Amino acid sequence: MKTSLEGRVAAVTGGASGIGLECVRQLAQHGAIPYILDRDRTAIEKARDELGGQVRGLEVDLLRYETIDAAVATILDEQGRIDIMHANAGSYVGGNVWEGDPDVWEGMLRLNINAVFRSARAVMPSMMARKSGDILITSSVAGVVPVVAEPIYTASKHAVQAFVHTVRRQLAPHGVRVGAVLPGLAVTPLLKDWDQQRLRSYVDAGATLNPSDIAEAVMFMLSRRQGTVVRDLVILPHGFDI
């Protein structure tokens, strides 16, 4: 049994591109009121122009943590509630550890872990008070299967999974659902530094996902009746397994 997303207020971090943008698009198509939380003002305005009037946008730098709390406060002031927090924003660093730059890791870890935790925490008090709400995190299949080619990224997503499973149990008595979508390789701006010939070989082999595939999974999770929770949804392309 599905529940309607009509009129539900959603905040999507990293919502101006990639998976986040497609989730915003599908939320709007389902009648929700999505807020894009993103640092790229130009991309926010472009998305709003494309997707229509019910899409809102707030410029948020997730590494300046106070802007997360400020954005949540703005949405609560404008709408009176937040039904969905989709902590989607993240970054990617792969490669051998001894060849990596720890300062680059630091930026990724702050975004993939700290900003996710803080985005979730920011909405907890209001959701708990209403005894209703969804906190959804874009994780990765690397959060459940260690991927040798990307140890630091894998570690960040394992941290996310630990957070999801513990916080879900803490919030369940308060009527708040917590879950994660765990996609395989998706063709998004995160892959901008990939060798394009290599990426094309993955696409041709059916080993990649489109953002719309992941957004459809997110809509499935959010539309379950309130008495159920999809705690982890792993989604992989047919041409790839792990």
Image (cartoon, rainbow, N blue to C red):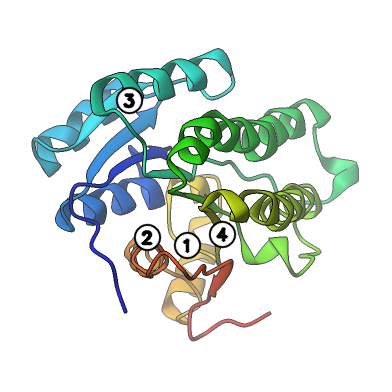
Of the numbered discs 3 and 1, the one sitting upstream in the chain is 3
Q: Are marks 2 and 1 in contact (CB under 8 Å)?
A: yes
Could you tell me residue 192's position as x and y percent? Answer: 48, 46
Q: CA distance from mark 3 to mark 1?
A: 30 Å
Q: Residue at x 9, y 40 (%)?
A: 52
Check disc 1 and report the residue beneath it. 186
Q: Nearer the viewer, mark 1 or mark 4?
A: 4
Bin the neighbour count of mark 4 within 10 Å (Cα to Cα): few under 14, some 14-19, many 20 and up: many
Q: Residue type at mark 4: give it.
A: Ala
Image quadrant holding the C terminus, namely bottom right
Q: Residue at x 54, y 31 (%)?
A: 125
The reply, left or right, for residue 26 in relation to residue 14 is: left
Q: Residue type at mark 3: give it.
A: Ile
The reply, left or right, for residue 181 in relation to residue 219 is: right
Check disc 2 and report the residue beneath it. 211
Check disc 3 and report the residue beneath it. 75
Q: CA distance from mark 4 to mark 2?
A: 15 Å
Q: Dividing the picture into quarters, in which one does residue 17 lie?
A: top left
Could you tell me residue 118's position as x and y percent? Answer: 61, 30
Of the numbered discs 4 and 3, the one sitting upstream in the chain is 3
Q: Is residue 199 above or below residue 164?
A: below
Q: Secondary structure at mark 3?
A: helix
Check disc 4 and report the residue beneath it. 180
Q: Residue at x 15, y 52 (%)?
A: 31
